[in-house]
Image (cartoon, rainbow, N blue to C red):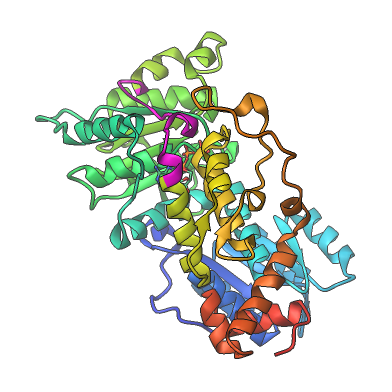
Amino acid sequence: MQLHANTMTKPPAAVNTRFNTTLLRVLLVEDEVLFARAVAKRLQKAGYECEHAETIADGRAIAKQFQPDMALLDMRLPDGNGLDLLAEFISQGISVIVMTAYGELNDAVNAMKLGAIDYLKKPIDLEELLLIVEKAEGATKLKTHLDYSRQRNAHEAEGVEMLGESPAIASVKMQVKRIAQLVAIGDAVPPTVLINGETGTGKDVVARLLHQMCEQNDRPFVHVDCASLPSELIESELFGHEKGAFTSAQGQRVGLIEAAEDGTLFLDEVGELPLALQAKLLNVLERRMVRRVGSTKERPVLARFVAATNRDLHAMVLEGRFRSDLYYRLNVLNIMMPPLRERGDDVVLLSRHFATQTERRYGLPKRYFSHEAMQLLRRYNWPGNVRELRHQISRAVLLSSGVEVTADDLALAIQPTQFHTNVEPLDIRPAPQAPSLVTLDSAEKMLIENSLKQSGNNVSEAARLLGITRMAMRYRMEKHGIKS
Ligand SMILES: Nc1ncnc2c1ncn2[C@@H]1O[C@H](COP(=O)(O)OP(=O)(O)OP(=O)(O)O)[C@@H](O)[C@H]1O
């Protein structure tokens, strides 16, 4: 057996102690070694732990030791068809994404019927692959593990930043600080916090900031996305289970509530929690005890509970879709995130910040916003809030042809009704057309060509300018038919 691996340094952890590991594990079964190395590198860079096997036999053997959470499986392998391994992996609870060659659509269809989460057609773009892996993570229980693991890493590596100087954000920062300073006396537990706000306003950022500012910031921060946990798994994910508690419970498992220890349990999108589980959660909050599925033993719960929602929970209570007792239990302290359109000039500060991030990531020269672009940014009403702003800015920075980001580089079709009420109306002119005609593919091609031009056709230097590996650069050049 050949182990092709990569830079894995830790020995594989046992299945039941996965909460103690830090990275989500991806097994790549692919016989094209160069491509596999490029994929492994990209995944490692994105925070995944990755192993590689070239054959079905190797894949089977490595999976036993490595205990992957997810597998990327090629369909044509030297010792058989990847479909043979697919069923085995799925029965072991491994999420599978298949990779098929051009014209092998039947394989993809069969794989999906057998339970693969998604498929990718070759030639594969690494960024697309990453997006699909991330999407698969979100659609399964894996997201929870990863958010938990990544967050632990993130706290070790860097602090959370909540940018903004507007009175609305200053007030949020003040509230977070006060809540973090509330020290529980004796046996008292920290009060629960409910964060409300439109999508993309930074509820997640606030939860992490609160954790960071608390005394127990070296304890775990466990992010549970209640919307993406499959309903059949949510109970055992949250509460844990004992061996044999149900048919597929081959081992004992610590639930996320327990995994939070005396840190923070962040229940994101709490409005999506099914009613039956709302009752169980209420019980945990009231009694501060948790019982694993299939166990008779109760364990104390020490974590701080922080919940977030973009729904009107009060309205959901009136409609009978959210338990009123749980609502009041969660809503002990409340933080309301203001929409971006109410944060005045924070939009300027955030735009500069996101532009600098993109410039650094792609090795681009510093960009400046034209006066018109700035006006547009200030006057748009940002329904997707800070998340939308971040995407728009990085897209505009990547697409701008010179050092100036113009209003046309921003794909904001502003409507007269979307203007802020307190600013003078902008010159009405047709919505920008050009950006919507540029595809991600052509933007990537343009970036690659530009970087090669800038580096005098030196591939390594061009890769450095773009902040990618030489291998990834070569892969992309080949994809776009660019010769050096
Ligand atoms: N004040 C801020 N400073 C810097 N970055 C921010 C700020 N607010 C939000 N962001 C960034 O915007 C994006 C969206 O934020 P976040 O995920 O916290 O929003 P959310 O309210 O939890 O969204 P959703 O309701 O969709 O889950 C993230 O990339 C986050 O880092």
Q: Residue at x 82, y 73 (%)?
A: 101
Quarter the N terminus occupies? bottom right
Residue 282 image position (x, y, % from top left):
38, 23
Q: Residue at x 59, y 82 (%)?
A: 454
Residue 309 image position (x, y, % from top left):
47, 29
Is 229 situated left or right of 484 in this image?
Answer: left
Is 167 situated left or right of 185 in this image?
Answer: right
Looking at this view, name the residue that lies furthest to the top. Answer: 318
Residue in the foreground of this view, choosing between 110 and 292: 110
Q: Residue at x 40, y 19 (%)?
A: 326
Residue 306 image position (x, y, % from top left):
35, 33
The answer to if 344 sits in the magenta stretch is: yes
Quarter the C terminus occupies? bottom right
Is 304 situated left or right of 293 in this image?
Answer: left
| In the rendered image, the vertical position of residue 472 relative to residue 128, given as above or below | below
Q: Is residue 217 visible?
A: yes
Residue in the foreground of this view, choosing between 298 and 330: 330
Q: Quadrant for residue 338, please give it.
A: top left
Looking at this view, name the residue that lies furthest to the left. Answer: 186
The answer to if 28 sits in the magenta stretch is: no
Residue in the foreground of this view, choosing between 138 and 303: 138
Is 233 situated left or right of 481 in this image?
Answer: left
| In the rendered image, the vertical position of residue 224 relative to residue 45, given as above or below | above
| In the rendered image, the vertical position of residue 28 relative to residue 471, given as above or below | above
The residues colored magenta run 330-348
Q: Residue at x 70, y 84 (%)?
A: 32
Residue 181 image position (x, y, % from top left):
16, 35
